[in-house]
Image (spheres, coloured by chain):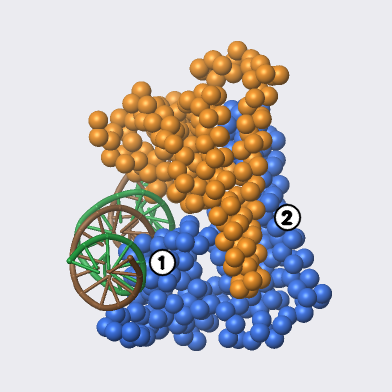
Chain colours: A orange, B blue, C brown, D green
Amino acid sequence: MKVPPISVLGYALLGLIDLKPSSGYDLRKIFAETAMGNYSSSPGAIYPVLERLDSQRLIRGVVEHSAGLRRRRLYHTTPTGAAELRKWLSKPVAQSDVMRGAHELMLRFAFMDHALGVDAAINFLQEFRAALRPYLSSLESYARENAQQMRLSGRLALESGIRGYRGMYDWTAYAIRAYHQSLTSQPMRPSQIAKGDL
Amino acid sequence: MKVPPISVLGYALLGLIDLKPSSGYDLRKIFAETAMGNYSSSPGAIYPVLERLDSQRLIRGVVEHSAGLRRRRLYHTTPTGAAELRKWLSKPVAQSDVMRGAHELMLRFAFMDHALGVDAAINFLQEFRAALRPYLSSLESYARENAQQMRLSGRLALESGIRGYRGMYDWTAYAIRAYHQSLTSQPMRPSQIAKGDL
DNA sequence: TCCACCATGTAACTGGTTACATGATTAC
DNA sequence: GTAATCATGTAACCAGTTACATGGTGGA
């Protein structure tokens, strides 16, 4: 089953549609209005990707004729699409993903416990943490070695990057704690376990 | 003087060359080995951009025949190029830049006190800080309003983003302090003021 | 009636990726 | 002599941007 490569935007759309069946317009709004603002939101980006995912049968769009003639294509994931999403989410955390800013890793994590469950999410966090540590210390030793020959603004910009990664590193510990807490002291309500839950 | 738009990568190269005359290979190494790993580093990205900057006379490449026949094109900025760089660095901090992850803003800041001086850098930090605050609070209120209907991984991913921006916000204060300190208690040595200083 | 918003589409362009190709130099 | 690294280039491809186009719907 050779699926031609899916872009990050493609996975973002696939993941969102898997969370909740949506139209192209819905998805554009999400990118435009919520914290996912780093993604496209332009029709020229989203509609072609949706068509492509549809032609590969990873999602399917059904036209709603709810009120009047106004058409609205509601997409939902197919079993193949959901499987493809899980495959992407299951990839090991690569060092290169971390170096590129970890944006894609965060996107994957956001979909994780819906598509793969809590155990996978915790495991992902541990992998993420393990990948972050060596990169962080390489940045720190780079800074130590080059700080004196850099101008203040360069030094500070580098330090901002290091702070960002250290923050992520701390966040992984916090997130792991949050999962353990949700498993022990705060048992899930049935509605949170049920499949139909948004 | 209508200069066709320069990409972020183009500005990154222009800024680096302005800091220190470099060859394409030097620049590739910087992207591959230092903390600027989020940029390309592939020859297919860098050489065409260098050619374009050269054809616009923003940089000029002179071939070094240092030892033997091996050619190495050392680029340096022209006055026009340096002016173009300063123009980019002088743009006000836009809200949209912040939303896109502030990567470009950090790049600009890294070049700032070499190309525009300390006062401009401090001013930039203040603008940056001012732009960060409302975005941070919009993220926070979004999180407050939507947390209960989100899954844990989504909630945590959002929180990671917020932490990142809060970290940047704190960093701006730290950076401003660092500038004031360098101006008062730690007067610069002449070598740090001299133009030839890397 | 007219504006704002819902909703989808598409055509032209462009910047960057991947992958390949070439040749010089240095170190072993 | 051969492997690693220095150093530059280029050709094919593709994803995403910009900008434009179309038409439905609801409210003032």
Q: Residue at x 67, y 62 (%)?
A: B128
- Report the chain holding disc 2: B
**Element carrying mark 1:** helix
Q: Which residue is drawn at 51% across and 18% down?
A: A196
Q: In which quarter of the image is the N terminus of chain B?
A: bottom left
As drawn, B59 above or below A37: below
User: Which of the labelled discs sits on residue B170, or is there none?
Assistant: 2
The residue identified by callout 1 is B28
Q: Residue B122 is drawn in which quadrant? A: bottom right
Are labels 2 and 1 assigned to the same chain?
Answer: yes
Q: Residue B143 is drawn in which quadrant? A: top right
Q: Position of residue D20 (x, y in %)?
A: 38, 57
Is residue A179 rendered to the left or right of residue A61? Answer: right
Q: In which quarter of the image is the C terminus of chain B?
A: bottom right
Look at the image and tell me whether residue B92 can be seen.
Answer: no
The amino acid sitting under disc 2 is: Asp
Q: Residue at x 48, y 77 (%)?
A: B17
Looking at the image, how many numbered discs can be counted on the residues?
2
Q: Residue D26 is drawn in which quadrant? A: top right
**Element carrying mark 2:** helix
Q: Nearer the viewer, residue B114 or B139?
A: B114
Q: Which of A61 and B99 is in front in this view?
A: B99
User: Which of the labelled discs sits on residue A99, or is there none?
Assistant: none
Q: Residues within 10 Å of mark 2 (few under 14, many from 20)?
A: few
Look at the image and tell me whether residue B104 can be seen.
Answer: yes
